[in-house]
């Protein structure tokens, strides 16, 4: 079949919501398109016209959650940062040819926060709490929306809205949140116990829907969907009755049964602690091949099973980490107990707003900037519409300025000329940022950097080299969260599935969205209803260490066009769901690709790094040290990609300003 014919059958030429709709409303070409087109053109331009204020947020049609196509690190959000990186952090605002001499905004604040993700928003919240409601705070962000990775995708199904999460997914294991992080949620009005009512844990099981594994012909020789009851959230646990259906060799099937059910100590002669140390430095792939001695086909089954948690395959994840996550092969191995072992498994994975943790970011904004979001409860935030034109209101004590990329942060105000002394003698912090292609400058008494750690050395070249090296150490995990609106989910009902793991496919996880209904928002619980599918891709290069895999994945994402994502969405869903009557050309209504080349915070990987590194020697601890009036808050600062980490680090940074 020719590529053109295949594309037509997949529906690549069919107009879908991403092309026909703006802001969730069908638009005919004509005057009704003008408002949205105006702000889209203004935003897409590298530079606003001479003498014209760049303020796309002020247009009534400005509404990023309603946009489809390529989101996340969207075009227009990363170019200035990359240009700064390529200049090796040397910013000369007087001689800059692209941005021009920085225009002084004439604004002065008590606190400037760089980054409007959950950590930056929480930092502003905590600072105001300590310093008082009269505090003047400016929050800068390079993207067109607030929330960082906690981003919201909106779709329209007739008169009904569908909400999806484009990044930060859930409030994971709230029972393990610190007093600070759970306290913030409670102050915002979030009662996590209510999710037991809002999340329908029995919906899919009441329809006899189970998980399944899709084996693709490119990897396993044929396309085959194998049902699997009790599919482990991270690993796999095939029942005896299903192993025979897996398209692998007979010897591999026997090895898979042995791996899952035999109580064998594959590390005889070692103490429990010796086993732990050995497994920490052995990948799960090598454990399977060298210790369990399975057929290589078994490795193919498990290769991508760690993508959801570690953003790499089992070749770059330690066997010990897999043991802690419940992967098979360790029933007969006596490992020492760990106080860190899977505390999240004590609570169900149900603490999820329909738009993920974007609702937390929205509740923070509602608390910080009056008039942006109506309502006052965790229920009404779900369907509240944000007024972006009020984010940067001069009458508000707290202002959020989007589409503004910080390029230089330094101490100023009678600072000593010796770079070694600037942090002690600087009376304020000067922040230069680029907005609408032009450099601008603001000042604040204090500054909190809640952006990516690896950008800070470019923003603050006056920092000590040791600290800059520590900040640059981490490589964030790249990932893609894709939301696909389909006309109905009858194919899932017919096939008896609700979630698919696809070890060899472009997207390794395909799931029906979480069944959450709260406030005026209702999950499309009938298979006849239009609904959202969530697809995960974590690009990586097996065989490299985890950091190099993340770098390779980042490069792939930056250079992948939307068309490539769309074609793979259509092809994969057609192959998985075709037997259930699904037609990708007919049934796909909208696609939103949330691309995150710099995704989740880097979590130290003991397989490639020093074993049992003391906390004080961790690069994130060295990197987050206060630098005069400049403090650091983000999930990178603790090396854990979780919302509570972002909140806790924001609190620490604020306490460094206000004292204990």
Image: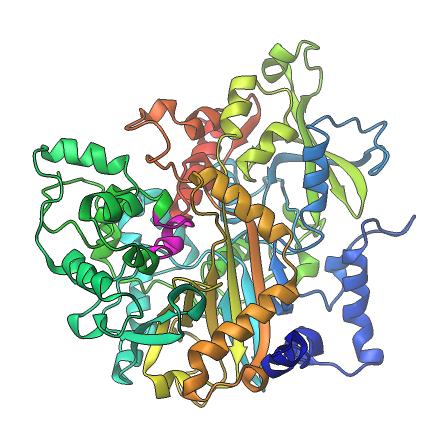
Measured as percent of width and height from the top left, residue 647 is found at 43, 44
Q: Is residue 97 above or below residue 362?
A: above
- In the figure, is residue 304 to the left or right of 390? left
Seen as rendered, the residue at the extreme right is 50
Q: What residue span does the magenta drawing correspond to?
A: 303-314
| Magenta stretch: includes residue 570 | no
* Residue 343 rendering spot, x and y as whole percentages: 23, 49
Image quarter hosting the C terminus? top left
| Viewer-proximal residue among 651 and 408 | 408
Q: Quadrant of the N terminus?
A: bottom right
Q: Is residue 369 left or right of residue 578?
A: right
For residue 198, above or below residue 358: below
Residue 305 to residue 322: above or below: below
* Image-quadrant location for residue 424: top right
Please tell me in which quadrant of the rendered image residue 24 appears: bottom right
Whether residue 650 appears in this view of the structure is: no
Question: Along the line of sight, which residue is nearer the eye, 173 or 541?
Answer: 541
**318 sits to left or right of 67:** left
Q: Identify the residue at image location x=13%, y=44%.
A: 266
| Residue plotted at (59% across, 20% down) | 463
Residues 495 and 206: in front is 495
* Residue 290 position in % (x across, y down): 23, 43
- Specify whether residue 343 is in view: yes
């Amino acid at each position: 079949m020719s590529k053109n014919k295949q594309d037509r059958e997949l529906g690549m030429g069919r107009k879908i919501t991403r092309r026909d709709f703006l802001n969730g409303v069908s638009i005919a070409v004509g005057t009704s398109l003008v408002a949205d087109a105006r702000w889209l053109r203004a935003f897409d331009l590298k530079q606003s016209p001479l003498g014209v204020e760049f303020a796309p947020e002020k247009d009534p049609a400005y509404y990023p959650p309603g946009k489809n196509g390529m989101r996340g690190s969207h075009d227009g959000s990363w170019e200035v940062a990359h240009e700064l990186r390529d200049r090796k952090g040397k910013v000369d605002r007087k001689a800059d040819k692209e941005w021009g001499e920085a225009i002084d905004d004439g604004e002065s604040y008590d606190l400037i926060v760089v980054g409007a993700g959950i950590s930056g928003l929480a930092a502003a919240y905590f600072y105001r709490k300590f310093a008082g409601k009269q505090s003047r705070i400016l929050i800068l962000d390079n993207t067109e929306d607030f929330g960082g990775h906690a981003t919201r995708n909106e779709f329209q199904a007739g008169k009904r809205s569908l909400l999806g999460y484009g990044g930060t997914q859930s409030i994971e294991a709230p029972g393990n949140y610190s007093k600070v992080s759970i306290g913030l949620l409670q102050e915002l009005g979030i009662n996590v116990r209510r999710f037991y009512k809002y999340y329908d844990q029995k919906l899919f099981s009441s329809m006899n829907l189970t998980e399944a594994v899709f084996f693709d012909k490119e990897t396993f020789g044929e396309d085959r969907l194998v049902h699997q009851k009790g599919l482990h959230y991270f690993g796999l646990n095939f029942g005896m009755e299903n192993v025979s259906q897996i398209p692998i060799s007979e010897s591999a099937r026997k090895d898979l049964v042995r791996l899952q059910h035999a109580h064998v100590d594959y590390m005889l002669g070692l103490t429990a602690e010796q086993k732990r140390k050995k497994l920490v430095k052995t990948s799960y792939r090598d454990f399977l091949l060298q210790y369990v001695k399975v057929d290589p086909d078994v490795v193919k089954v498990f290769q991508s099973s760690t993508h959801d948690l570690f953003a790499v395959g089992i070749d770059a994840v330690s066997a010990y980490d897999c043991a802690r996550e419940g992967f098979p092969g360790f029933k007969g191995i006596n490992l020492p107990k760990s106080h860190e072992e899977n505390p999240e498994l004590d609570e169900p994975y149900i603490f999820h707003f329909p738009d993920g943790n974007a609702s937390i970011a929205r509740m923070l904004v509602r608390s910080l900037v009056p008039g942006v979001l109506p309502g006052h409860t965790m229920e009404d935030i779900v369907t509240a519409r944000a007024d972006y034109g009020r984010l940067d209101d001069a009458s508000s004590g707290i202002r959020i300025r989007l589409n503004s990329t910080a390029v230089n942060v330094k101490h100023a105000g009678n600072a000593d000329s010796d770079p070694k002394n600037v942090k002690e003698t600087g009376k304020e912090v000067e922040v230069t940022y680029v907005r609408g292609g032009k450099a601008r400058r603001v000042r604040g008494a204090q500054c909190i950097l809640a952006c990516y750690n690896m950008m800070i050395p470019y923003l603050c070249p006056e920092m000590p080299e040791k600290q800059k090296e520590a900040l640059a150490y981490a490589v964030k995990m790249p990932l893609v969260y894709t939301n696909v609106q389909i006309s109905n989910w009858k194919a899932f009902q017919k096939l008896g599935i609700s979630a698919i793991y696809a070890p060899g496919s472009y997207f390794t996880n395909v799931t029906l969205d979480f069944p959450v209904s709260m406030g005026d928002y209702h999950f499309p619980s009938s298979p006849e209803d239009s609904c959202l599918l969530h697809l995960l891709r974590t690009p990586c290069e097996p065989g490299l260490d985890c950091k190099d895999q993340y770098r390779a994945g980042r490069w792939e994402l930056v250079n992948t066009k939307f068309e490539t994502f769309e074609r793979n969405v259509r092809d994969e869903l057609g192959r998985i769901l075709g037997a259930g009557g699904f037609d990708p050309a007919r049934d796909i209504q909208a696609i939103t690709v949330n691309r995150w080349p710099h995704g989740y915070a880097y979590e130290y990987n003991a397989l490639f790094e020093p074993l049992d590194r003391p906390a004080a020697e961790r690069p994130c601890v060295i990197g987050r040290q206060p630098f005069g009036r400049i403090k650091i808050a983000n999930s990178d600062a603790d090396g854990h990609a979780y919302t509570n980490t972002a909140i806790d680090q924001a609190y620490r940074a604020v306490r460094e300003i206000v004292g204990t």
